[in-house]
Amino acid sequence: MNSLFKKGSTKLLILLLLADLAFIVVHIIFELFLKSNTLFSINRDLGYAEVYQYIKEFWILVLLFVLAVKSKRMIYFSWSLLFLYLLLDDSLQLHENIGSYLANHHQLQPVFRLRAQDLGELMVFVSVGFLLFSFVGGAYFYSDDSGKEISKHLFILVISLAFFGGLVDMLHIAVSFGKPVFALIEDGGEMIIMSIIVWYVFDIRSHQLYNSDNAIIVEQNR
C-alpha cells in the first residue's frame, strides 16, 4: 500500500509539472507569435496560469490544515498560515498595494535601478516573512522529529520560491536587457516550485493516511 501512495504521488507530480510546462509553452507561443490574448501569459495577474497557481496554493494550505487537525500539531498549522498568506497575497496583490502605500508614505527613492514601489514591496516581504517564519520557528521548537524534518524541506522549498519571486523579480526590474527571459524564469520557476510543494504536502498526507490505516489494522488483529 505504501508503494501505491508513492506511485500515486509521483504521478501527481508529473501531471502538475506537465501542466506547468503546457502553460509555459503556450506563453512562449503567444509572446512570440500571437499576442492576441494576454490571459495566456504566465506574467499576467489573474491570467490562466496565475489562477492555476492560486488553486495549487489553496490545495497546499488545505492539506496542511487537515494535517494540523488530524495530527494536532501546531507546526502544520503554522505552515498552512504561511500558504494562506501567499494565496491572499497573490490573488489580492497585497504586497503590491501595501508596497505602493509604503513607498508613498515614506517617500522612498529609487536605488540600484529599483523603483520606490519595488523597495516598498521588499519591505512588505521582509516584514511579513519575519512574522510568519517567527511563528513557524516557534512551532518548530516544540515539534517532534518528523515535524522538524518536514519543516526543513518546506523551508528549502519556500526559499526556492522566494528566489524566483523575489531575487529574479528584482533582476527582471533592475536589468535593462533580457526582460522577457527574466520574466519567464521568474514565473515559470514559481510554478514549478509550487507544484513540487503540492506534491510534497500531498505525499506527507498520504503517508499519514497509510500509517493510520496500518494502526487500525494492527488494533483490529489484536
Image: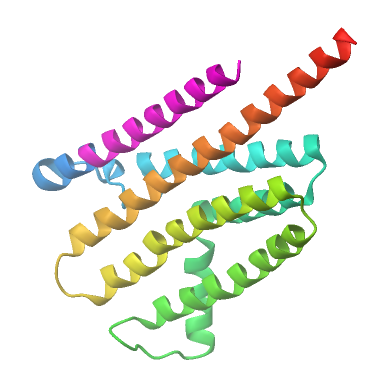
Is 114 placed left or right of 78 in the picture? left
> Would residue 44 be seen by someone viewing this image from the given angle?
no
State the residue at coordinates (50%, 27%).
9
Residue 108 in the image, given as x and y percentages of width and height? 45, 89
Res. 3 visible in picture: yes
Image quarter of the C terminus: top right
The foreground one among 203 and 135 is: 203
Q: Quadrant of residue 166?
A: bottom left
State which quarter of the image contains the N terminus: top right
- Extreme front residue here? 222
How far from the left and from the top, in percent, is residue 120?
48, 79
Coloring basis for residues: rainbow
Question: Is 49 left, or right, of 62 in this rendering?
Answer: left
Q: Does the magenta portion include 4?
A: yes
The dominant secondary structure in magenta is: helix
Magenta segment: 1-25
Q: Residue at x 68, y 53 (%)?
A: 148
Residue at screen point 64% across, 29% down? 207
Outermost residue, left side: 33
Q: Work out whether residue 82 or residue 35 is closer to the camera in this orientation and state it.
A: 82
188 left or right, relative to 218: left
